[in-house]
Image: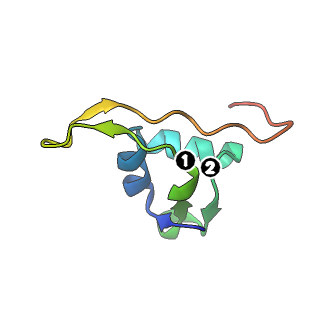
Amino acid sequence: MMRLVTAEDAAWYAGRPVGTIWRWASEGRISKVGTGKQARYDAAGLNKAERDEWTRALITPGEPPPLPAGARAA
């Protein structure tokens, strides 16, 4: 099931910078729909970051999704 979100929302969910979300999409680690500012990313393919229950401060970022078979990291 796809859960499409903006790059900013995906970055917050994963506890990673927006640039990392863009790179993961270009490497094929996560699905992307659309282009430019209208692009949306599949949050179901991301590992959730660990955050403080009260302050929502980042404790541990989510693990990177695996590379597809035969792909090389950027």
Report which residue position mark 1 lands on: 22
Residue 18 is left or right of residue 74, and the answer is: left
Report the amino acid beneath label 1: Trp
Q: Quadrant of residue 49?
A: top left
Q: Quadrant of the N terminus?
A: bottom right
Between 10 and 34, the residue placed more toward the observer is 10
Residue 31 is left or right of residue 40, and the answer is: right
Q: Quadrant of residue 55?
A: top left
Report the amino acid beneath label 2: Ala
| Label 2 SS | helix
Residue 55 is left or right of residue 21, and the answer is: left
Of all residues shown, which one is farthest toward the right? 70
Of all residues shown, which one is farthest toward the front? 53
Between 42 and 44, the residue placed more toward the observer is 44
User: Marks 2/1: CA distance?
Assistant: 5 Å
The answer to whether marks 2 and 1 mark residues whose Cβ atoms lie closer than 8 Å is: yes
Residue 14, image x, y percentages: 43, 43
Instruction: Give the crowd class for mark 2: few <14, some 14-19, many >=20 residues within 10 Å.
Output: some
Which residue is pictured at 43% across the width and 53% down the height? 10
Whether 13 is drawn above or below 72: the answer is below
Q: Quadrant of the C terminus?
A: top right
Instruction: Give the crowd class for mark 1: few <14, some 14-19, many >=20 residues within 10 Å.
Output: some
Of all residues shown, which one is farthest toward the left? 54
- Asked which colour scheme the image uses, the reply is rainbow
Residue 12, image x, y percentages: 35, 47
Whether 6 is drawn above or below 12: the answer is below
Report which residue position mark 2 lands on: 25
Residue 37, image x, y percentages: 47, 65
Q: Quadrant of residue 52?
A: top left
Which residue is pictured at 53% across the width and 48% down the height? 46
Between 69 and 73, the residue placed more toward the observer is 69
| Label 1 SS | helix
